[in-house]
Each structure stands twice: as structure tokens, then as C-alpha cells.
Amino acid sequence: MTIDPGLRRLALRTLLAAFPGHTAPDWATDLLTQGLAGYTLFGYNISDGDQLAALTGQLRAARPDALLAIDEEGGDVTRLAHRTGSPYPGNAALGAIGDLDLTRRVYHAIGTELTAAGINLNLAPTVDVNTATDNPIIGTRSFGADPVRVAVHAAAAVVGLQQAGVAACAKHFPGHGATVTDSHHDLPTVDVTEQVLRERELPPFAAIVAAGAKAVMTAHIRVPVLTGDDPATFSRAVLTDLLRDEFGFTGVIVTDALEMQGAKRIAGGIGPAAVRALDAGADLLCLGADIDLEIVEQVAADIVAAIKDGSLSLARVEEAAARNDALAAWTAGSIEVEASPRLGYDAARRAVSVEGSLDGFEHPFVVQLRAGHTIAEGAVPWGLTMHLADTPQLAVAADETSVDALIDAAAGRPIVLVGRHTHRNPAARSLAEQLAAVHPLAVVEMGWPAGWRPRGAQAFITTYGASHANGRAAAEVLGLAG
């Protein structure tokens, strides 16, 4: 079916698509010349800095003002350093340090790297208040559990990124920190009163609006007091009445990936989700990671059909496209340069917390417990392994070993047990508790800090993240860095 070319171009101007590979296929560059707003780049698009610069150059040759976005949060969520781990600590570590200028400088450094790579929209910072200890998707991506702390660091992060000429996209509005469900897989619910929402979830978003954030990302979460049964991404009460009219936000509202189950399943597909998000007030529709030409064309066709049948206002789509154009124009401005190669590593070291004593752990046996990763994080290397020189070590799943096996392997050495969200894994938790009762043990926790401590452990080290910088910091604190 042939669709109106003018309306198709208008629909494309609201879409942030994706493609596979280290070079853009012809259809991807063709879409840019036909009006597509831009692309989100993922780890699978990146091998190294030179290749990434060539890729963004290829895309900008098709259209210089394309929006090229990425999830570069530092810490546990990195695309630039997905093969090695980020050289910067994440938000939990920065929040624990409490130095606002350091947060600004770290995000400015990230922004400088993105600018050099040809990327102009960072889908960061995460400004959710992580009040659910077992939150499966936010965790160390958050600056903390205190709304004021998160708010001031969120504003500093936005300023830092945008001083480098990269548009900040604060996420996930109106707050994903109180959930215990991952919206990639289902529709989480935050069933609280409006007063709780305003006191706990919303202050960071008010702060980033005041700081001049160029973009805000929606959350695929249900907040019944505001959204009823729908996710916030489809809620006019959230996107238009609250964010636009009450908070006074004038920038671009970006959706979280519409391929996520928290949106696609509720709407009945990516295309219907795109129409509902636009109608609610979203401007830039992030389609997701597993996207091809057929999906892009179908979403554009669904938007055009909705305009034609009157279920979606033409003026609303024109408004969205104009905002996206303005954002792309802003990123073409001048930037400030401020670089420090050790910045992230020095910051990560400041975040490390040591409870107890490390006396006697000069020559330990290091055991890293294998742990999974979220879709947002991806399979990025983590831990101490890459930072150790002559220290004997072992990587093992908690449910595939035993206390006796580890003690035998340690051969008389004290054990340093390295984990990520250890308290959430029953096998890992039990193993640590049993080890601590019978053998000298220090625990390194590289996930979201919880109240759990294994009784009898001589030391408990918290890094507030699992980036390359966090791992290096832990190795340095232990005196083991090679």
C-alpha cells in the first residue's frame, strides 16, 4: 500500500530507529535522506573509536542534522566501552561520594567522548530514586534512595553533558525506582498516592527541568493514580498535564523503547504504541534495538493511518517533529572541552566503602561469583579479574561450588569473594555466610548496596557499581591492582 509521501516524511521525523552492524546498511542511510529523525546506537554497532567515528560520519553524510543517540550512563550501562567496562563510576558511586562538581565533571567527560564520536543525544542520566532494594532494572544506575540527593546530582549530570554539546535525556519519567519488575518484560506498577509520588519520585525531574535538560524519557510503568491501567508513555495526564503544563518542560519527550513489553504488549504492537505515545504528548519515538526497515515502514504507516482517520492530530505530529528538529539544531552549537584521563578512576576510588578490617588480606585468593545482567546493561565485563596481576583467582557460579572446594582452592589464603547483588542470589548468599563462619573472608559487593552482611566476615567492601573503574578501585583498595 502506498502512503502519502508528505505524511510519511512527517511520521519519519518522529522516529529513532536502529540497525545491525558496524556500518549502516543502505536502507538506513536512505531513511535519513527521507526524513528519519535518527538512530540509537548499541554495543553491537561499536567495535572501537575509529570505527564508531566512521559510522557516525557515514550517517551524517546522509543528513548532517541527524539525531544519533546512545545509552552511555557510565558505570554498569555503557555502549562505548561495552567490551571492557566503563572507565567511569556510575550514578550510585557518584551519589555516595556526594560531590556535585565531580558528578558534573564525570558527565562532562562522558559528553566530550560522545561529541568526539559524533553522537549528540545521550539517553542519560538515570534520575530514578531507587527506593526498592531489589529493583531489577535501576539499582546502581540511580544516584540513591534519597530524592534530594538524586535531584541535585541529576541536575549536575545534565549540566555536565550539555556543556559538552550533548543533549541530556533524563529518565524514566515519572520514576522507575520503586518497581520490582523490569519493564522490558512486563508492565510494572507503582501503586502510591499522588503525594508520595510528588515527594519521592518527582523532585529529580523538577530539578532537571530547572537545569535545562533538552530531553526527558518516559517510563513504561503504570502509576494508577495518574495513568489508570496504562503505562506513563501513553498517558496524557503524565506527559502533557504534568511534565509539560505543570513542570514547564519545553524540550523533547522521548519514549523508552517501544519494543519493550511494557509498551508493545499493552498497545498491541510497536506501531499502535507509537500512535498512542504521540497522542499522549511524546515527540521522539525510540523504537528499540531489534529494528529493521520493515518495522520502521510499518510504524510510519500506522502513524499516517492514524492521522488520516482522525485518531491522531496532524498538528500534534507536526509539533513533535518540530521539537525534534530544534533539538538536532541545538546540538550543532559550540562545546566546552575539559578532559582528564584519570577522572573516572579517581572518582570510583572515592566511592569505595570498607567496613571492618583488611588486615591479613595482603595475599588472598579471589573468588568471583558469576552473575547475570539486565537488558539495559548487556554482557559487559566486570569484577576484579582484569585488574589483578599475580593474585590467584577463580570465577565460579555459587551453585556450582562449595565451601570446602573454595577453602581447598585457597590453599591457606584468606578469601576475597566478589559478587554483584549477592544478597539477591540465595546460593551466593548462603555460600558467603557459610564461608564467613569458618574461613577468613572479605566480601566485595559490586551491585546495589543492601543491608545484608554475612556474619563473621572480616571486611565488607562496597563499590556502588561494576564498571571497569569500580573494579580497579576495589583492586587498589585491596592492594592487589596490577
Image (spheres, rainbow, N blue to C red):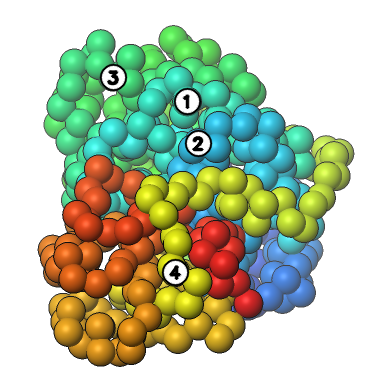
For badge 3, the amino acid type reads: Leu
* Nearer-the-camera pick, 144 or 348: 348
Q: Which residue is mark 4?
A: 361
What distance separates the C-alpha of mark 3 from that of mark 4? Answer: 45 Å
- Left/right placement of residue 344 relative to residue 375 reads right
Q: Of label 4 and label 2, which has the lower sequence position?
A: 2
Of tags 4 and 2, the one toward the viewer is 4
Tag 1 and tag 4, C-beta contact below 8 Å = no
Q: Under tag 2, what secondary structure?
A: helix
- In the image, farthest residue toward the front: 360
Residue 285 % position (x, y): 46, 45
What distance separates the C-alpha of mark 1 from that of mark 4? Answer: 34 Å
Of tags 1 and 4, the one toward the viewer is 4
Q: Of label 1 and label 2, which has the lower sequence position?
A: 2
Q: Residue at x 33, y 14 (%)?
A: 199
Q: Which mark is residue 95?
A: 2
For badge 4, the amino acid type reads: Phe
Q: Of label 1 and label 3, which has the lower sequence position?
A: 1
Q: Of label 3 and label 2, which has the lower sequence position?
A: 2
Q: Which mark is residue 197?
A: 3
Kindly indicate the quadrant of the structure image that contains residue 39.
bottom right
Q: Residue at x 32, y 58 (%)?
A: 458
For badge 2, the amino acid type reads: Gly
What distance separates the C-alpha of mark 1 from that of mark 2? Answer: 7 Å
Q: Which residue is mark 1?
A: 149
Residue 461 % position (x, y): 41, 55
What distance separates the C-alpha of mark 1 from that of mark 3? Answer: 16 Å
Q: Of label 1 and label 4, which has the lower sequence position?
A: 1
For badge 1, the amino acid type reads: Arg
